[in-house]
Image (cartoon, rainbow, N blue to C red):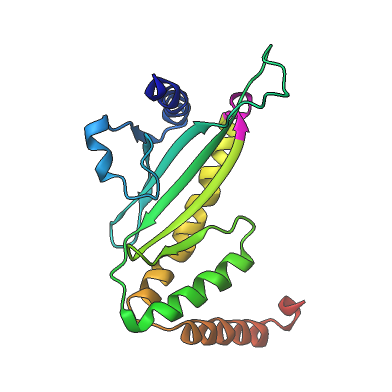
Amino acid sequence: MGKKILDQPLQKIQLLLTKMGYECSLPIPGEMEMCQSFHLRPTLLVLLGFSSHREEHILEISAMPLLESKVLPPKNFSPYYQIDFVIPIPLKISVVAKEQLLSLILFLNRLLDWPGFAFDELHDQLSYRYTWLAKESMWEERSFGLLLGTFTLYIKLFSEILQSVGEGKSSMEGLLEQVLDLYQKTFKANPTSAN
């Protein structure tokens, strides 16, 4: 019985995202182990695109209704759902680079409007995670377009940088030096662009 409650929202989200042009699939319960996220709830898989190395960027979506409050009247009550969005980022972590990776994650999360990069040290798993609390009436193309567009932008901008630092191919200090050099070259070429 609980499975139907959890799957119905995912089916609605799948229909909405398919209408928007995304490739989606709802794995059958026996296939749930292929999802790499932190939860063991039914999960909708959405293809967001590919990295420059042709790795798939898969978004995992789970939705769970929040418990009704005894104070709220049951008539016309529309529950809020906790919708978790998780994008695992493939990574072969270098033990030496782990501290650099964690520093970079903290640095990026402070800059982002929707911080969500995380590193699960128990499983050596890097991911982007965002949780949205929303009623079904809020599930519309515009909302999901904004959410998935932002997630895709963050993954395209930062996943390869995070992988490079996590695998020990570059350091956070080296990346900051590159940004500073680029800024200085831009400023010298166009002094008014610094303002």
Q: Quadrant of residue 25?
A: top left
Q: Quadrant of residue 181?
A: bottom right
In the rendered image, the quadrant that contains the N terminus is top left
As drawn, the residue found furthest toward the top would be 75
In the rendered image, the quadrant that contains the C terminus is bottom right
* Residue drawn at x 51%, y 44% as measured from the top left: 148
Residue 93, position as x, y percentages in the image: 31, 73
Residue 84, position as x, y percentages in the image: 49, 42
User: Could you tell whether 103 is left or right of 138 in the image?
Assistant: left
* Residue drawn at x 41%, y 51% as measured from the top left: 87
All told, the count of numbered labels is 0
Residue 162, position as x, y percentages in the image: 42, 70
As drawn, the residue found furthest toward the front would be 70
User: Could you tell whether 37 is left or right of 148 in the image?
Assistant: left
Compared with residue 61, is residue 78 higher up or lower down, i.e. above or below? above
Residue 176 is one of the magenta-drawn residues: no
Residue segment shown in magenta: 134-140
The front one of 146 and 182 is 146
Compared with residue 150, is residue 181 higher up or lower down, i.e. above or below? below
Compared with residue 64, is residue 180 higher up or lower down, i.e. above or below? below
* Residue drawn at x 38%, y 24% as measured from the top left: 3
Compared with residue 77, is residue 67 higher up or lower down, i.e. above or below? below
Residue 185, position as x, y percentages in the image: 59, 86
* Residue drawn at x 45%, y 58% as measured from the top left: 155
